[in-house]
Image (spheres, rainbow, N blue to C red):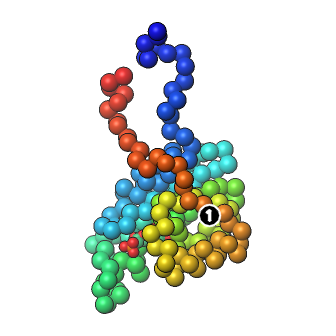
Amino acid sequence: MAHQGNSNQPRQDYLKWEDYFMGLAGLAAMRSKDPVTQVGACIVGPDNSIVSVGYNGMPNGDDKSFSWGKGFENNLENKHLFVCHAERNALNYARANSTDLKLCTMYVILYPCNECAKAIAQAGIKKVVYYSNKHEKKVETIAARRIFENLGISIEPYTTPNKIIVIDLDKINRT
Ligand SMILES: O=c1ccn([C@H]2C[C@H](O)[C@@H](COP(=O)(O)O)O2)c(=O)[nH]1
Ligand SMILES: [Zn+2]
């Protein structure tokens, strides 16, 4: 029997495309400084090329002038009025590179809010795959769903059972 390392067969447990793209969105989310909800988005071209990634963060990464709090009576102490959403950051980066997004798909960790849904629609993206819908009862999410439905933008949950993707950087040294 051939030693595994000498096999002439391709690996079978390689990362499938959907897992790769959602994994990249998850990796981008790990850059977020939001203490509660870290969101990442990955925009993918029709040829499976990575067009852009983004995550939620304060404008220009300024964490000193803005609070990451929420639930404060004074809305100006809450993060929500200030934080730039992952989807918008990914769209802005793609636009800065003049990419036509019409045939692209967006993979995103959280179901987009209404503002992101509008930006996705304006960019011409026709397919969105999301991981969590933990804010599904919020009016922003309900409005987003209406935008997607009315404009015929496909919004699908990520269904792959692969919820944990381990990145073992040192594996290369053991094989
Ligand atoms: O479409 C969206 C919606 C939300 N976000 C970001 C904005 C905030 O940083 C968090 C939400 O915080 P909660 O504590 O869960 O209210 O998610 C986003 O990037 N994209
Ligand atoms: Zn949003």
119 versus 162 height, above or below: below
Q: Residue at x 51, y 26 (%)?
A: 11
- The foreground one among 155 and 103 is 155
> Which residue is outermost to the top?
1
In the rendered view, would you say 8 is above or below 66?
Answer: above
Q: Residue at x 46, y 46 (%)?
A: 162
Q: Badge 1, how many Cα within 10 Å: few under 14, some, many 20+?
A: some
Q: Which residue is mark 1?
A: 155
Q: Tell me the residue at 63%/77% (across/down).
A: 146
Residue 43: image location, x then y, percent: 57, 55
> In the rendered structure, which amino acid carries the disc numbered 1?
Ile
Q: From what the image shows, is residue 43 above or below residue 63? A: above
* Res 125 seen here: no
Circle 1 — which element? strand
**Image quadrant assignment for residue 124:** bottom right
Q: Is residue 166 left or right of residue 15?
A: left
